[in-house]
Amino acid sequence: MTDNNTEAKGSFLQSAVNKSQNQKEQIIISSVEIKPPVVIFADMNTEMKEFAFEKAELAIKLVYKGDLKYYKDVAQSLKEQFDEKFGGTWHVVVGRHFGSFVTYESKCVIQFWINQFSFFIYKFG
């Protein structure tokens, strides 16, 4: 009796091995499911929200890949991208457990979760 789930896993891993024949090590990030964002609070236009979700998802993939190691690295990356795209002074907090009480500019704040990462992004200054 064969287990279809085992066969599927075997095919997936074999496919990954075939794709990485010339590499010594390969981190398979495609096996990590990135769940849709869960918004806790938002006062932000749709363009900014979509930008936040897209960049946060990319940062999570870089964490799983090993290119970003610490929450501060993720926060710095997002802050720099927000500063560049939308101007002004953006602040970014990334983690699992934190509290906050901040002043922010109208239409420039969002807090959301993706997987086990909480993102709090706001503009002030």
Image: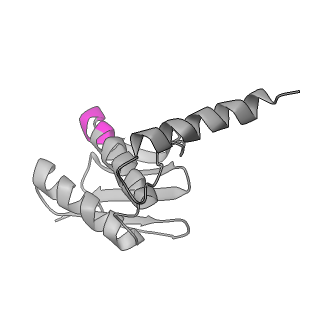
Q: Is residue 48 magenta?
A: yes
Residue at figure coordinates x 89%, y 27% from the top left: 1
Q: Nearer the viewer, residue 96 or 9?
A: 9
Residue at figure coordinates x 35%, y 72% from the top left: 72
Q: Is residue 26 left or right of residue 107?
A: right
Residue at figure coordinates x 45%, y 39% from the top left: 18
Residue at figure coordinates x 20%, y 54% from the top left: 82
Q: Which residues are magenta?
A: 46-50
Q: Is residue 101 left or right of residue 47?
A: right
Q: Nearer the viewer, residue 16 or 115?
A: 16
Q: Looking at the picture, how far across and down is residue 39, in whole percent?
A: 48, 43
Q: Is residue 30 magenta?
A: no
Q: Is there any visible trace of residue 107 in the rendered image?
A: yes
Q: Is residue 17 left or right of residue 88?
A: right
Question: What is the quadrant of the C terminus in the image?
Answer: bottom left
Structure colour scheme: one colour
Q: Nearer the viewer, residue 10 or 30?
A: 10
| Image quadrant in which you'd find residue 47 | top left
- Give the residue furthest to the front: 22
Q: How many marks do you count on the picture? A: 0
Q: Examine the rendered structure and indicate whether residue 120 appears above or below residue 35.
A: below
Q: Nearer the viewer, residue 29 or 106?
A: 29
Q: Is there any visible trace of residue 37 in the rendered image?
A: no
User: What secondary structure do most residues of the magenta stretch adopt?
Assistant: helix
Q: Looking at the picture, how far across and down is residue 10, in whole percent?
A: 64, 37
